[in-house]
Image: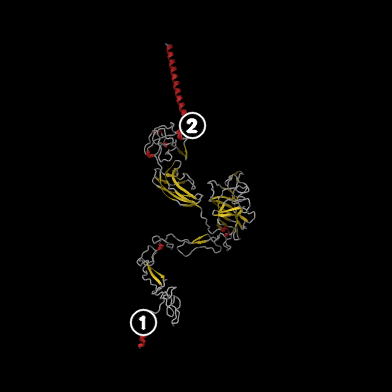
Amino acid sequence: MIALAFAHALVTALVTALVIVIVDVIVIVIVDVIVIVVALVIALALVLPLPLVLPLPLVLPLPLALVPPALRRPGPGPARQGGGGRGVCAIAGVPPRTLRLPGRPRAWRLDGFRRAASTEIMQRRCGVWFGAGCLAVLFIAVPEATWGANDSVFVSQTVPATVTRGAPLPVELTFRNTGDTTWTRAAGYFLGSENPMDNMTWGTNRVWLPEADAVAPGASYTFRATLTAPAVEGIYDFQWRMLQEAVEWFGAYSTNLRIEVRAPVFACDGTETLCLDLTSAAAVEASGGVVVGGDFTAAGFQPSDRGGIDWEFGPEHDFSAGEMEVAVTGLLPRPGGEGDGGKVSIFDFCGLEPETNEGVGLQKMAEDYRDGHIFRYGMDDDGLADNWDAVIITGRDFRCYYSINDPPWQEGETHNFRLTWSSAGLELWIDATHCASGGNGDTFDPASKLFTLAARCTHYANQHAIARFTNLRLWARGARTCGNGVVDPGETCDGDCPTSCSDGDPCTADTLTGSAAACNAACSYPAVVACAAGDGCCPAGCTGATDADCGGPATCGNGVVDPGETCDGDCPTDCDDGDVCTADLPTGSAAACNAACRHTPIPICTGGDGCCPAGCTAANDPDCTGSGDAGTDSPGVPDSGGDGCDCTLGRGARGPSPLLLLLAAALLRRRRSR
């Protein structure tokens, strides 16, 4: 019995141990499987985009109480558990954001653990969109009402129909928020360029809200911006649409406009030493220029080999300091001569042959060119060669690194260059960009009398300029002495400068600019246009209601001639001026206080009106009496005499009236009767 009991206990122990081992193995296997699955998911999440990871069973239906508050979708109504319904992709500790299908205004629907292959889920954290690292993903179903929707309608726009190339373009576009989200800059709401999407035609592809502005649902907002016109003439599309950055473009498009970009109108302002359009040889020669070589077309002046234009200036012009603006068109390489490969370098100061030949040239050089690019090769400070296509060298110690590929310069484009020089050095601008500054080693000689715009100012044979100069403005701004009694270039006065301005007219603004100390004082008298009391002026369009200087509202019959009245209380009712040689015509009426008389000279030769107009005679106007009478042959001409009463009557003069003749006859009869 003892042996049997021992055997039974042994078997029981073995079975128990076996069960424990089996259970342990099962638990270990389950744990290992879970670990392997988790590891696999982590590996997939690190190498695959989030849309490919989400179908895996990572989304677990948790009780709402177990969901951290930061992961709960805010909004009215309780959240619902379950795998279906609308969902939010949330990262632990990060408030959830609405997920959307690209291009659709509503949140997408999660169907269990399946979704359409075309959907795309993204979550933004700290301003960065990511998906592969989104591991702790929870989908919490929420009521429809809690989901925000972006939408907008286009209202209006104010945009110029034309603009000068490269010029600022002020625009206003108004959109109304018809969604249920509030637009703020922090939330990533912008206007984005369209047609095509995200284009940079107008210098930017985004117009943003100011930080302090917020556009609530139902409100309209006007986006204001100053864009930049393209650098090339043409017709360009202008269209915009709302977007939430990295979420979606939404709502209506603005009405597409076709804006014309024009070439700038060249104009001189009278301050220049030299200013002309370089399209006519006759105009250049009339300005004193000597054409050394080159051709003129409507596109501008193209210097030839050994070509250019020289201007010689008198001693009154001092080019030791000055400024030059020139427009250059067609900066593209073409086959040149003598090994230079058709490359150009802009603005190379010279003055070596002869010394007086100072100027600015467009040239080609046989050395230091690479890869068929436009500009001359330069060296970095570390001596390494680079920027083959982005270097302009101006003078011996003045170089400007400027890219022509952002955006690329096109054939036929015109670019504006401005160069200033003085004892302080050189400054160069290309279009609106300040390009470089230089030392004072290349300033013009104060004694220079010759300025050259050329292929090279010394006209070497192996430089072949290819670009065209289209216009030129040149200022001599050398040393001048304020107080020498001579109005030097750049001065408006010297010794007799105005210190105050008044033309005695209350309807002009007396404006003094500059100062006598700087010899640049000047007066201007712009017209007063604003209706303002106390300045003694009643501008056109103002009344007593808007300007007390207009004397109050016009009232006919108050005895005051108000603005718009010609009389008040003493209006003319009879326009006879006593001159038979004028037609007396009344206008207006006394009742309206606008009565007036117009006296028009009678030009017609006709009898019976008592007038003999200029050019009329007795032959065609009986009122012009013949010779030997007391009248006049024509106004202001003495009668021909011979009747004992030779006299001259003025225009409209007449002989004695019949009443006077009768009175004289009665007096004579009375004397005789005595």
Rate crowding at label 2 as few (under 14), some (14 to 19) or many (20 or more) other CA atoms within 10 Å.
Answer: few
Between 405 and 510, the residue placed more toward the observer is 405
Residue 540 lies, in percent from the top left, at: 42, 61
Whether residue 501 can be seen here: yes
The type of residue carrying mark 2 is Ala
Disc 2 or 1, which lies upstream in sequence? 2
Q: Is residue 298 left or right of residue 619?
A: right
The type of residue carrying mark 1 is Leu
Residue 445 lies, in percent from the top left, at: 62, 56
Between 180 and 21, the residue placed more toward the observer is 180
| Label 1 residue SS | helix
Between 144 and 291, the residue placed more toward the observer is 291
Q: Residue furthest bottom?
A: 674
Which residue position is annotated with label 2?
43
Whether residue 273 can be seen here: no
Q: Would you place residue 639 above or below residue 301 in this image?
A: below
Residue 661 lies, in percent from the top left, at: 37, 81
Q: Which-is-in-front pick, marks 2 and 1?
A: 1
**Marks 2/1: CA–CA distance:** 138 Å
Which residue position is annotated with label 1?
662
Q: State which quarter of the image contains the N terminus.
A: top left
Q: Quadrant of residue 564?
A: bottom left
Q: Quadrant of residue 309?
A: bottom right
Which residue is painted at 36% across and 84% down in the image? 667
